[in-house]
Amino acid sequence: MQHTARLSDENLRRIEELKKRYPHPQAVVLEALWMWQGEHGWISEDGMRYIAQLLGIPDHHVFGVVSFYTMFNRKPVGKHKIEVCTNVSCMLRNSERILRHIEERLNIKAGETTPDQRFTLVEAECLGSCGTAPVMQIGDRYYQNLDPESVDAVLKELP
Amino acid sequence: MESLLLPQIPDVHRIDIYEAHGGYAMLRAALSKTPDEVTAEVKRSNLRGRGGACFPTGLKWTFMPKDSSKPKYLCINGDESEPGTFKDREIFERNPHLLIEGAVIACYAMGVTTAYLYVRGEYKYWIDLVQKAVDDAYARGYIGTNILGSGFSTDVYIHRGAGAYICGEESALMNSLEGQRGYPRVKPPFPAQNGLWGCPTTINNVETIANVPIILRLGAEAYAKIGAPKHPGPILVGVSGHVNKPGVYEMPTGVPLVDIINIYAGGVPGNKPIKAVIPGGSSTMILRGDALEGVCMDAESLKAAGSSVGTAGLIVMDVDTDLVKVLQRITRFYRHESCGQCTPCREGTGWMEKILTRFCNDDATQADLELLLDVADNIEGNTICALGDAAAWPVQSMIKRFPEEFEKHIQEPAAT
Ligand SMILES: Cc1cc2nc3c(=O)[nH]c(=O)nc-3n(C[C@H](O)[C@H](O)[C@H](O)COP(=O)(O)O)c2cc1C
Ligand code: SF4
Ligand code: FES
């Protein structure tokens, strides 16, 4: 089957390298999905089929994997996905205020994307950063010890 | 106590600095012993796993078959997703070479030729830091083929997860590594017989492995004298919630919880009384703030107090905390993270969340409280993996130790 979107040559080379680390190519599936999401922002069904073919595993297997892990986006998200931890340690340090503040600033509710596709806001489970609560993650970056002022500064800085 | 896991050496995360302070000398020393001697040393140290269950590490290593026609594997568990837990990240950031040195020593002791470090997907920044350290260790011959001319070879690979608490459970971790959904496996068979790709496998926590070079450096006997006799060694305690100085603190096991809170973590803001603490991450049983006297951060003491060490993630809650709201949030987490294989866990966590939401809305009855306990009791012990228990324990302990917190939210049934 022909795919309209594909992985970059560099990532394809990298996948070949990674395959050598495991007795079965299937073990590379998470990393391949990370690459896809990195290049395309979210993982389409077409992308899943492409990766299945690349690794020689059934399509439905890749579908199952993608739906199991919360960090894979199964539909398009805003340019910046903001994940605010509301689990217990953050809750004790008023993460709710942070979440409400961002909702107000972006004029969306948690779970929604701004009409200009710039921001998606979601609630996150514990990010493993409870000592610097409240915390949010945007892309690969953590923003810690948040208060409304520092949140505003972060939002302003984002490209 | 001198800091052993997170020493106060500037830039010790860099390989030059690590080496200059004796780093990788213990790998060299280990390679001059037999693998059995190394395992025996770890056994004599009485090191117990830092991943939650406090299982004796040396003993676990001896479960690995000596003669195996199949390859053997080590999985280092850096999934670190238990709410209240943020200690392994500190090792990734501040002392990754200690972890790598420990990993290679562990591989040598068990005859493992491939180790995978499984790290939660959110920790991308820290994965990159550790990857740099791994690359440097390869370049200096501490990992790879014929390590330091010993004839022993092993690889260390980092494997990134993608957001699923359950993948910290050891059998789910192996499935995830194999590229499957992270479903826990029914045990037996145990990983030492039938683990990754059906091969003998040991799973150890990041902090557990980081203790290994320390044991060799101090000697097992001296190590065993640190802290609590039955659960010795340095331990990383993460303190969060209502304290002035939250963070990760290294200390010997056996420090009284009140000292951890007041001395290490600077006490409670406004000097408010403590209503409750969760001693070791969200799945451990909650303790009353007025019953902390004499309770220490070690397996025996916390067991006697009716809880456990877990991941040593101490969550402190002051007198103004609404514990039912806390419990609702914790339960929501377990409902979200349940993999759904077992009916009691899948249905029970959802049910408990619903009941607790009624309490939060002041819309609950006395019968709800009984129902809540009943659901929790029916989850405990009836599931494939310990996530079910982890969801039940906070509920059971909260009802037992804080009945008044629920009473506050109960609506008196209207007289008809
Ligand atoms: C639901 C669940 C989640 C777990 N998460 C982790 C984790 O994130 N990190 C960890 O080291 N152990 C975790 N464990 C414990 C592991 O199953 C295993 O016991 C541990 O990694 C063994 O290492 P140790 O012997 O060095 O403690 C979890 C267990 C359960 C039931
Ligand atoms: S106890 Fe829960 S998380 Fe564990 S296997 Fe059963 S359903 Fe899955
Ligand atoms: S509870 Fe928010 S980072 Fe752990």
Image (cartoon, helix red, strand yellow):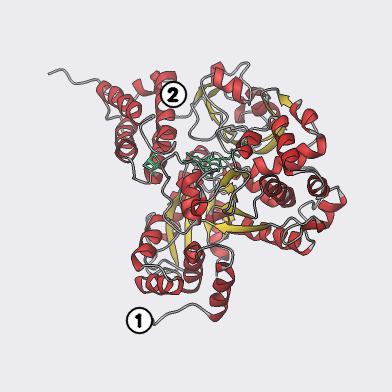
Residue bearing mark 1: A1
Instruction: Tell me the amino acid under the disc marked 1.
Output: Met
The foreground one among B9 and B246 is B9
Residue bearing mark 2: B397
Q: What element carries label 1?
A: loop
Instruction: Tell me the amino acid under the disc marked 2.
Output: Ser
In the rendered view, tell whether residue B191 sits above or below residue B306.
Answer: below
The foreground one among B103 and B160 is B103
Q: Quadrant of the N terminus of chain B?
A: top right
Q: Can residue A116 be seen in this view?
A: no
Q: Residue at x 53, y 52 (%)?
A: A136
In the rendered view, tell whether residue B327 sits above or below residue B23.
Answer: above
Crowd class of label 2 (few under 14; some 14 to 19; many from 20; radius 10 Å)? some
Q: Residue at x 86, y 48 (%)?
A: B21
The quarter holding residue B385 reads: top left
In the rendered view, tell whether residue B168 sits above or below residue B397.
Answer: below
Which chain hosts label 1?
A: A
Mark seen at residue A40: none
The quarter holding residue B151 reads: bottom right
Q: Is mark 2 on a helix, strand or loop?
A: helix
Q: Residue at x 55, y 58 (%)?
A: B160
